[in-house]
Image (cartoon, coloured by chain):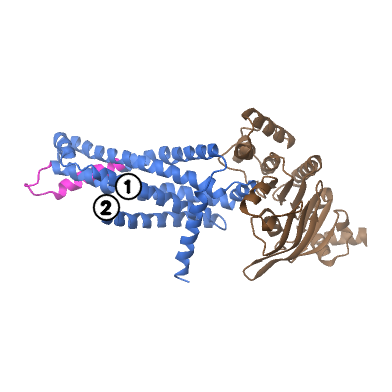
Amino acid sequence: MIELQNIKKKFGENDVLKGISAKFEAGKTNLIIGTSGSGKTVTIKCMVGLFEVDSGAILYDGRNFSTMTLAERKSIRKEIGMLFQGGALFDSLNIEQNVMFPLNMFSTMTKKEKLDRVNFCLDRVNLTGKNKLSPSEISGGMKKRVGIARAIVMNPKYLFCDEPNSGLDPQTSLVVDQLIKEITEEFKITTIINTHDMNSVLEIGDHVVFLWKGLKNWEGSGKEVFTATNPELDEFIFASKFLKEIKSRNFG
Amino acid sequence: MLLFQPLYHFGRYCLMLKGAFSKPENAGMYWKETIRQMVSMGIGSLGIVCVISFFLGAVTTVQTAYQLVSPLVPLYVIASIVRDSAILELSVSVLCLVLAGKIGSNLASELGTMRISEQIDALEIMGVNSKAYLILPKILGALVAIPALVIISCAVTILGGYTVSFFTSVITPEQYLYGLHDKFVGFNVTFCLIKAFTFAFIISSISCYYGYFTEGGAFEIGNSSTKAVVWSCIFILVSDYVLAQLIL
């Protein structure tokens, strides 16, 4: 479980996070939603240590990440997998080498064991046999799936996904979403997804946190999002005239 | 503010080097990456180095002959001048200015692209010291590849002058070979290598600095690349003067 305790973050005079507290449980897909500039990405980057919080605490199963030394953080980072918006695959390496990279760096496995693990992960994301392709030869959806394979290759306890559906068509988005959900449940990972894709909220949102101007504005399940009576959340979800009409027709 | 900026960059540059020269997580992976960088910088620049050096030697020979109008100066002196020019300046400083453009822009844009496309963030999250993994092999690669290129350049520059002696009447091949041996100072080669190592460090570390700290998008990658080349050239010229003043 990951717990945020009143985290705050400022960039110059710009208050991006004004005190966010939330709990993200293991084995569940936890979604952080919100408008652009609401602080979703900053929250995730603070959680993985790419940004330092100004105050507050980030607890990984009770271990306070914000007060840890660099060496202690390194050990936690080996338990973290992250899927980036653009995949963040290493251009100079092929798919197999990309997925194998964390194993090469940190594990003491034999070459055969590493290859078996890589093939298992590629198989898990439906990319069997694509080992030798380079990142420039594959589609955006495949890049995301390679990113997922790389994120899970070290058996992480925590998985972070930064807008996993951006730039993908609805069908491919669904495949990526389902994959993340299956992996989360199968390996009992604490998964945190940063998104503004409503399909994801509906399909895989076990727990949803809505951020509004740097604050947690609403929290609930994916299904509750559409029936909540929160004006800011309403404005965010039913942004278009068409959706507003659908809402008034279905939910009153 | 004007004083603060250079201090800020110098401080950040020193911290980057401190991060880069720290204990590797997996020596084998670092070694592989260092070899890859050596091949990329060394073999990748060999063609341009040979072409530039050959013509530098040829042109220096012809132009030195043009300037030596006194009948009191023997023609073999042309070869001695080409040799010393190559070893002391042409194949080191001039070549490294060219390499700052080729290798420096390459390093800065590679790291800049990695930064923009979140590949550096990905390394950090995996628990890899990105400064050490990305910068150390590049600096070590440059420290091996660039001096090697400089040595090759010295030979090819001298060869360029020798070729001229076959096809023109400015100097005969025999005079050229005699001039090459005449009053050769071995220390010049040592000085040449000292400069080569210094310039290699300047090119690689400054380019890595601008690439690693790129912020923004494609426009900023171009900017970082330009700054890397400009500052590398300036520091090469300054250190060239300082080394000459201190050592010669």
Mark sitting on residue B247: 2
* Above or below: residue B15 compared with residue A138: below
* For residue A167, above or below residue A235: above
The answer to whether residue A164 is visible is no
Amino acid beneath label 2: Ile
Per the rendering, the colour in which chain B appears is blue
Give the residue drawn at x 53%, y 56%: B213
Q: Give left or right: position of A49 versus B220.
A: right
Which tint is chain A? brown
Question: Which comes sooner in the sequence, label 2 or label 1?
Answer: 1
Q: Which residue lies at the image location 82% right of the left edge and 61% below the top edge?
A: A238
Amino acid identity at mark 1: Ile
> Horizontal placement of A13 versus A170: left or right?
left
Give x and y (percent) for residue A174: 78, 45
- Callouts 2 and 1 close, C-beta under 8 Å: yes
Q: Tell me whether marks 2 and 1 sit on the same chain.
A: yes
Residue farthest to the left? B72
Secondary structure under tag 2 reads helix
Decide whether residue B65 is among the magenta residues. yes
Host chain of mark 2: B
- Residue B162 image position (x, y, % from top left): 21, 37
> Disc 1 is attached to a residue of which chain?
B
Provide the residue designation for mark 1.
B194
Instruction: Give the prevailing secondary structure in the magenta stretch.
Output: helix
Q: Bounds of the magenta span?
A: B53-75
- Toward which corner of the image does residue B86 lie, by quadrant? top left
Q: Quarter of the image for the C terminus of chain A: give it.
A: bottom right
